[in-house]
Amino acid sequence: MEFSTEVKRLNANTSLFIKSSDFGRNLGKDWEERCYQQACELARKEALKQLKEMDDKLFQNLPPGWKVVSFRKRTSRTRFGDLTISRRLYTDEEGNYHFLLDENIGLEKACLATPSLQEEVKSLASVTSFREAASIIEKLTGG
């Protein structure tokens, strides 16, 4: 099968591929970025699913005397882009508030980045300026 015919066939089945005639207009140069963004989108969907499952398990194993107050949203910056999660806010038997999901996955209060991303930023910032580190992280984190 000829390459251009194969590309056209794939184009009919997925948005990732473009017609061979479009390559003359440099539309094929961003294929890697499109693939990366699609992979990041899949990662965000999977992360939301796993975090919801974790939050549900924490709720099912709630300590005695704890009560659900409400659901609250939080946006965190991850290696694969920004992720907005909805998680339960609890009160314990003494009236203290807790986000059990945040506590269990290590999300610090008022900190935007996940622990994994924080470590990468610290590592990068130790060998370059903060401005350069921020620029590199922005390019590499699907955001």
Image (cartoon, rainbow, N blue to C red):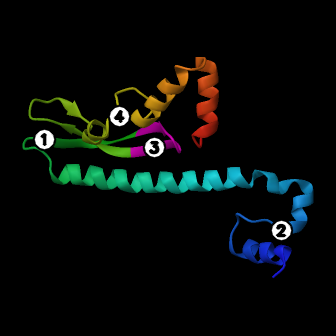
Dot in front, 1 or 2? 2
Residue extent of the magenta highlight = 74-85
- Looking at numbered disc 4 in the image, what kind of residue is underneath it? Leu
Taking 12 as reference, is 119 above or below it? above
Task: State how far apart marks 3 and 2 are (Cα).
Answer: 35 Å
Reading the image, the residue beneath label 4 is: 107
Earlier sequence position, callout 4 versus callout 1? 1
Q: Quadrant of the C terminus?
A: top right
Reading the image, the residue beneath label 1 is: 66
Earlier sequence position, callout 4 versus callout 2? 2
Dot in front, 4 or 1? 4
Q: Quadrant of residue 132?
A: top right
Question: What percent of the width, then of the height, locates residue 98?
Answer: 23, 34
Disc 4 + disc 2, Cβ < 8 Å: no
Residue 19's disc is 2
**Horizontally, is 20 left or right of 136 in the view?**
right
Earlier sequence position, callout 4 versus callout 3? 3
Task: State how far apart marks 4 and 1 are (Cα).
Answer: 20 Å
**Horizontally, is 64 left or right of 78 in the view?**
left
Task: State how far apart marks 3 and 1 are (Cα).
Answer: 25 Å
Question: What percent of the width, then of the height, locates residue 138?
Answer: 61, 34
Q: Quadrant of the N terminus?
A: bottom right
